Image (cartoon, rainbow, N blue to C red):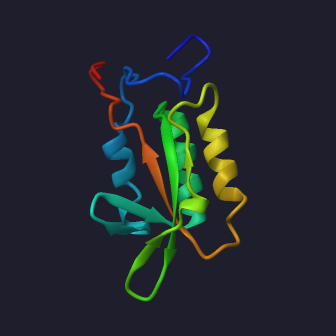
Amino acid sequence: MTASGPHCSQRGGRAPEGSLTPEELEAQYDARGLRRGRRLLLAPPASRELIAAARLEGVRILGINGFDPEDSAVRPRPEHSVDLAATIGDCWTEADAHIGARSDANLLFEVVLDWHYQADGTS
């Protein structure tokens, strides 16, 4: 984190005291999504809320993966995915805009949080 706030180009980092880890943050959305292995797939409104919460906690967004929910399966849709790992600046706004542009599509999204973010400052 810098004096002006977190930047998406930073890897790892120290959580401000009382902040949630990425694991804790994502767990708050479990009941609103669909789990497929480690992936938490969320509808656009919940995805955007998770992005806003990640911004408040200073947790970077590394990417957004789009999925097409079918009957009992979920099919990846790479054309609706974006890699934000190398983003310099505001990854949260880019992630939110990416989902916002697809909010009318019948898609679920995985918000890929930076799991290297540690509350004790290690990465």
Give x and y (percent) for residue 30.
36, 62
Give x and y (percent) for residue 73.
39, 81
Q: Residue furthest top?
A: 3
At 31% across and 18% down in the image, what residue appears?
A: 121
* Residue 23 located left or right of residue 107: left
The quadrant in which the C terminus is found is: top left
Q: Is residue 34 above or below residue 29?
A: below
* Residue 59 located left or right of residue 80: left
At 52% across and 74% down in the image, what residue appears?
A: 68
Q: Is residue 107 above or below residue 117?
A: below
Give x and y (percent) for residue 9.
53, 24
At 44% across and 64% down in the image, what residue appears?
A: 41
Give x and y (percent) for residue 56.
53, 35
State the count of labels: 0
Q: Is residue 78 above or below residue 92?
A: below
* Residue 20 located left or right of residue 9: left
Q: Nearer the viewer, residue 101 or 26?
A: 101
Q: Residue furthest bottom?
A: 71
Q: Nearer the viewer, residue 41 or 57?
A: 41
